[in-house]
Image (tube, grey):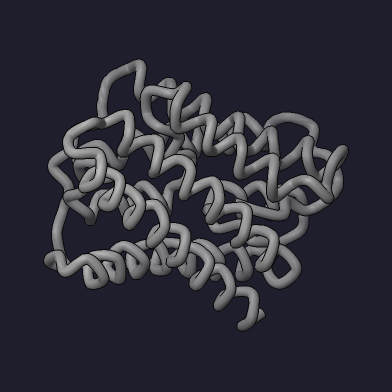
């Protein structure tokens, strides 16, 4: 159990370091070109996810995401104490990853975002993004388990570009990104609506007939 919790903490911390660091670097090198910054951010995130999921899935399932852990609990692959442990590890890991990135880039460690992300379209985008992510995990686990890391990584990379919310699809990621006033930030006032949309998606998935087999990642 301790190894699983530690893997979730480290994995989510590294995920947020990748997301935040690539956002900072992309914005700096893009010289104001948001498309270049998003391209670098999405590619780095997808590549990082592939590595993290591949390496950590045998240890903890590499959920790295509270809604994935909720789905795992719903499928009977986690008990309640394990679910609580995973969620705490994911949230604290995500925040730690953001703070580590600030330190790496010589930025103030404690900060909050000023980037607004709100409106019906963005909320609907987060609902759809989370439904897509959980569906990819569910169907991938059943039909293409050996390709699951790649499927998730590619879905997230593509999601950056076809959703108005840029495919957060993760409550831990959302909370942590409210604590960075960089390219990937989200204003704290918008966190609740994002997390609500993500949890609604998890609820919708839980109301459908779930296939046997544990979710293996993000």
Query: Residue 95, can we see it?
Result: yes
- State which quadrant residue 119 falls in: top left
| Front one among 59 and 191 | 59
Q: Nearer the viewer, residue 110 or 171?
A: 110
Q: Quadrant of the N terminus?
A: bottom right
Q: Quarter-wise, where is residue 130 in the image?
A: top right
| Picture coordinates of residue 131, whole percent (x, y) | 59, 30
| Location of residue 15 in the rendering, given as x and y in whole percent from the top left corner | 47, 59
Task: Tell me if residue 183 can be seen.
Answer: no
Q: Is residue 46 above or below residue 135?
A: below
Q: Residue at x 26, y 31 (%)?
A: 34
Residue in the picture at 31% in, 62% down? 98
Total count of labels? 0
Residue in the foreground of this view, choosing between 109 and 203: 109
Image: 172 above or below 34: below
Q: Is residue 101 above or below residue 206?
A: below
Residue, x 64% and y 74% (percent of image)? 4
- Judge from the rendering whether residue 169 lies leftward or rightward of residue 5; answer left or right: left
Instruction: Pinpoint residue 58: horizontal percent, then vertical percent.
Output: 75, 68
Left or right of residue 81, residue 146 in this image: right
Q: Is residue 112 left or right of residue 86?
A: left
Identify the residue at the far top of this view. Answer: 121
Residue occupying the point 61% across, 70% down: 81
- Residue 200 locus on image (x, y percent): 51, 32
């Amino acid at each position: 159990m301790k190894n699983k919790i530690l893997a979730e903490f480290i994995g989510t911390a590294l995920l947020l370091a990748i997301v935040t660091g690539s956002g900072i670097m992309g914005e700096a090198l893009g010289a104001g070109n948001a498309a270049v910054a998003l391209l670098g951010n999405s590619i780095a995130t997808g590549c990082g996810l592939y590595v993290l999921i591949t390496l950590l899935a045998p240890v903890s399932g590499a959920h790295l995401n509270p809604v994935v852990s909720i789905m795992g609990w719903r499928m009977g692959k986690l008990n309640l104490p394990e679910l609580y442990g995973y969620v705490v590890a994911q949230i604290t890991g995500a925040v730690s990853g953001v703070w580590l990135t600030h330190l790496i880039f010589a930025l103030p460690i404690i900060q909050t975002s000023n980037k607004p992300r709100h409106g019906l379209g963005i909320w609907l985008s987060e609902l759809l993004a989370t439904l897509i992510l959980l569906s990819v995990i569910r169907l991938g686990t059943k039909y293409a388990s050996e390709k699951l890391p790649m499927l998730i990584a590619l879905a997230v990379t593509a999601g950056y570009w076809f959703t108005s919310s840029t495919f957060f699809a993760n409550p831990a990621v959302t909370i942590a990104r409210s604590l960075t006033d960089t390219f990937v930030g989200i204003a704290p006032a918008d966190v609740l609506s994002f997390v609500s949309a993500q949890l609604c998606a998890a609820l919708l998935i839980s109301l459908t007939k779930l296939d046997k087999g544990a979710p293996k990642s993000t």
